[in-house]
Image (cartoon, grey):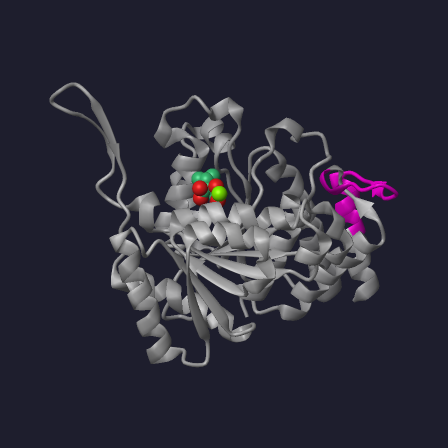
């Protein structure tokens, strides 16, 4: 069997350092498990802009389209904040990459690690054992709807506008991803909308109900307004299993959910496209955190979200559940053993660098294997 093509896009800031730790794991898998990936690396974001004048070079996009899976570090930083909108790393690289590969399903788990229970600002009993999955639609909705822009009116005023739009097929395809996930978990799906105000989400709710009745009678479907959902996430997050929602609602709710865990530096994500005729599926994995320019280059960033993104990649793209489990168990064991990067440091624990954390994970994998 040909080796799976894995494209690594370290990007900017701490993305470079955290990705170096994933490389250790890839090397270990090759040496100890004879699992060889066809690994290549390309530029994206500010680093790509500096080298080529564009944040998403054609070469990078072509490599992304050819890959079986993509692992992304992070993009952006103050150095590129004053570039025109379309050249900024986020707007010029991340969003077009999602759109070009049609990565419409964004999976954002929020899981509380026992060892980090005290890292959250919420009471331990509210979050202990928390394990929810937010499914965010990623290539439609308010982020991409047309018309959009800024125009000058006859009276000289300016008017800015974006459009919230979804077609039935867009709603159905994200709905199916969420229902399928719920089916593999606790069989409960909460669809989040603003049905009392926005026409587009009236359609959203109708389509979710139809889908449940036609294809997923075994999954319990509930609905919640997005404002109430933000409140419920903080009040009693364990009421949720899987949630599915519009692009921008999901952007906001997933930041909220990630902070329940107290450790943004711990959370991975997956962005998936449609399954192709050959069974493959475009997929991009990345940590939820950004490029953290303030701590970049100091070897103090937490590499665990990037490492866990790689484990999601093994699980969802490469069907390697055993290896994914091994990585996740190693992360849990290392945390239990008391090692912490600065962002999750707690009294009585040992503060370690990015590199030492990466080495510790590999050592633990060796032990557990
Ligand atoms: C995210 C980020 C991006 C988004 C930004 C960087 C464009 O906030 O992935 O959640 O808004 O989708
Ligand atoms: Mg966001």
In this orientation, which residue lies closer to the viewer: 70 or 213?
A: 213
As for residue 176 lying within the magenta part, the answer is no
Q: Is residue 1 above or below residue 36?
A: below
Taking the image as shown, residue 231 lies to the left or right of residue 146, namely right
Q: Which quadrant of the figure contains the C terminus?
A: bottom right
Q: Nearer the viewer, residue 30 or 188?
A: 188
Q: Which residues are magenta?
A: 343-360
Residues 157 and 303: in front is 157
Q: Dividing the picture into quarters, in which one does residue 362 lie? A: bottom right
Q: Position of residue 171 (x, y in %)?
A: 32, 62
Residue 242 shown left or right of residue 327 in the figure: left
Q: Nearer the viewer, residue 183 or 36?
A: 183
In the depicted structure, whether residue 110 falls above or below residue 60? below
Picture quadrant where residue 322 is located: bottom right
User: Could you tell me which residue is drawn at 33 percent across and 51 percent down?
Assistant: 140
- Is residue 254 at least partly visible in the picture? yes
- Residue at the outermost right position: 348
Q: Residue 271 at x, y = what percent?
A: 47, 55
User: In this rendering, does residue 40 appear at all?
Assistant: no
| Count of numbered labels shown in the rendering | 0
Residue occupying image coordinates x 67% and y 30%:
297
Residue drawn at x 66%, y 46% is 263
Identity of the residue furthest to the left in this view: 154
Q: Quadrant of the N terminus?
A: bottom right
**Residue at 41% over, 56% down:** 245
Residue 127 image position (x, y, % from top left)? 67, 56
Horizontal side of 183 relative to 341 (left or right) equals: left
Residue 285: image location, x then y, percent: 53, 53
């Amino acid at each position: 069997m040909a080796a799976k093509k894995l494209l690594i896009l370290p990007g900017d800031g701490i993305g470079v350092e955290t990705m170096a730790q994933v490389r250790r794991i890839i090397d270990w898998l090759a040496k100890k498990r004879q699992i060889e990936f066809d690994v290549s690396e390309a530029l994206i974001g500010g680093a790509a802009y500096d080298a080529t004048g564009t944040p998403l070079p054609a070469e990078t996009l072509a490599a992304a389209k050819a890959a079986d899976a993509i692992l992304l570090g992070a993009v952006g930083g103050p150095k590129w904040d004053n570039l025109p909108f379309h050249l900024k790393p986020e707007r010029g690289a991340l969003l077009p990459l999602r759109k070009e590969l049609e990565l419409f399903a964004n999976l954002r788990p929020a899981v509380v690690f026992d060892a980090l229970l005290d890292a959250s600002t919420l009471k331990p009993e509210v979050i202990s054992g928390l394990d929810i999955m937010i499914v965010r639609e990623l290539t439609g909705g308010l982020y991409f709807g047309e018309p959009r822009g800024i125009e000058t009116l006859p009276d000289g005023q300016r008017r800015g506008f974006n459009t919230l739009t979804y077609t039935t097929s867009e709603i159905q395809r994200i709905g199916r991803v969420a229902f399928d996930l719920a089916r593999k978990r606790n069989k409960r799906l909460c669809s989040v909308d603003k049905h009392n105000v926005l026409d587009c989400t009236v359609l959203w709710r109708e389509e979710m109900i139809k889908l449940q009745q036609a294809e997923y009678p075994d999954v319990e479907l509930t609905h919640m307004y997005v404002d109430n959902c933000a409140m419920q996430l903080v009040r009693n997050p364990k009421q949720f299993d899987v949630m599915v929602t519009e692009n921008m609602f999901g952007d906001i709710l997933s930041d909220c959910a990630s902070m329940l865990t107290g450790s943004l530096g711990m959370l991975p994500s997956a962005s998936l496209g449609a399954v192709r005729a050959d069974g493959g599926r475009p997929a991009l994995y990345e940590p939820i955190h950004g490029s953290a320019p303030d701590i970049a280059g100091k070897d103090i960033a937490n590499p665990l979200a990037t490492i866990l993104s790689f484990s999601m990649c093994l699980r969802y793209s490469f069907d390697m559940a055993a290896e994914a489990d091994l990585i996740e168990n190693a992360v849990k064991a290392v945390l239990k053993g008391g090692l912490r990067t600065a962002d999750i440091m707690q009294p009585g624990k040992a503060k370690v660098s990015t590199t030492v954390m990466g080495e510790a994970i590999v050592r633990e994998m060796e032990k557990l294997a």
